[in-house]
Each structure stands twice: as structure tokens, then as C-alpha cells.
Image (cartoon, rainbow, N blue to C red):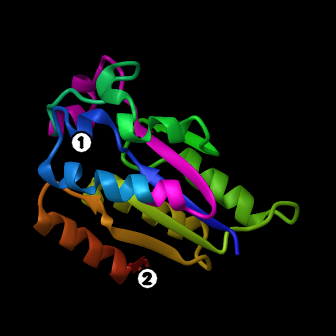
Amino acid sequence: MKKLLIVVDMQNDFVTGCLGTEEAKAIVPKVVDLVQNFDGDVWFTRDTHQSDYMETQEGKKLPVIHCIEGTEGWEIIPELVSFTEKADKIFDKPTFGSIALADELRKIQSSTDIEHYDEINLCGVCTGICVISNAMLAKAVTPETPINIIASACACVSPDSHETALNAMKTCQIDVI
């Protein structure tokens, strides 16, 4: 059985930086353990903005400069950085969901030459924004592949928003484990 773990946006700005939360800090040991012991491929995403962030639609709606490419806040948290060196793929994404990640999943799952994933798992931050966006993209391009959200290894801006996102994904036939 071939499995994939997608670690979403475990970056300094989202854990200990300008958009960090106690909830995000609390999941770090769980995410590290999950990545360290995962029996399958591991991909990472990085929220990636440029110096013009405040002029973007996202910047106007979330006016907090974060994850500017090349800055310390953009980097994967220190506890996971060694795993990125061995990661199968890292996707820098300019918005909530990664189209490049979805394209790669579609390519693999539709190929006759590449072994397909039997399940896709996601963890990371923020459950209600980037985790849900990438889970929905994965479900859209691989509708017959089970998509799992590892709830104890995800965090959002509040416990309520975390639960709301988990319930929304359940409605879309994404399993919360």
C-alpha cells in the first residue's frame, strides 16, 4: 500500500511568528512524530509570498505580512527542517491551495507507469484555510483515493475554526482521523 503525507505550511510565521498560535505550537511534536515515522512519501507545502503581498487580494483581506520568500518566517520550522532535506517534494504556493501539488497528484494517479497512492494524508496549519484548500484540491483530482486529515496534527486560529473546517471536509467525503 503506497501512502502519501502532505505537511501543510509548518513555517515559522504560522507557528511561532506573526501568525503563530498556541494551537500551532501544540501540534509540533505530533507533526514531527508523524513525519519521522510515516511509512510512505512525504511532501511539504510552503506559503510563499513576495514583497508586494500587501497589494494582493489576500494582503488586503489579511493585512499581516508573512511568509515572504527567503525570510526566516517563510522557512519550515526548525523541528522539521531536516525532514525537508529528504522530502520527496516541496511545493511553494502563492495562495492557500497548491495547483502544482494538485497537478502532480493528478499526473501520478492517472499514470499507467507510476505506482498510485492508495491514500493521501494531510496535517499542518491552518486547518480552515490551507489544509482545507489542499485537501479539497487533492479530492478533486483524485476522487477515488481516500483523503485523510490527521486532526490531532492540524491547528487553526482557534479550536472552533479547527472543528468547523474538519466538519466541512467530512461533508466533502474527506476522512478525519
Q: Crowding near pointer 1: few (<14 within 10 Å), some, many (20+)? A: many
Name the quadrant of the C terminus. Answer: bottom left
Alpha carbon distance from label 1 to label 2? 28 Å
| Identity, as a three-letter code, of the amino acid under mark 1 | Val
Q: Is residue 76 left or right of residue 159?
A: right
Residue 60 has which mark?
Answer: none
Which numbered disc, 1 or 2, marks the residue closer to the eye? 1
Q: Which residues are magenta?
A: 34-61
The image position of residue 7, as x and y in percent, is 45, 52
Q: Are discs 1 and 2 less than 8 Å apart at CB? A: no
Q: Which residue is mark 1?
A: 15
Decide whether residue 39 is among the magenta residues. yes
Find numbered disc 2 in the image and state the secondary structure of the residue it sits on: loop
Q: Which residue is mark 2?
A: 173
At x 21% / y 24%, what residue is drawn?
54
At x 61% / y 40%, what residue is drawn?
86
| Identity, as a three-letter code, of the amino acid under mark 2 | Gln
Examine the rendering and report whether any part of residue 91 can be seen: no
Decide whether residue 97 is among the magenta residues. no
Name the quadrant of the N terminus. Answer: bottom right
Q: Is residue 2 left or right of residue 160?
A: right
Q: Is residue 163 left or right of residue 70?
A: left
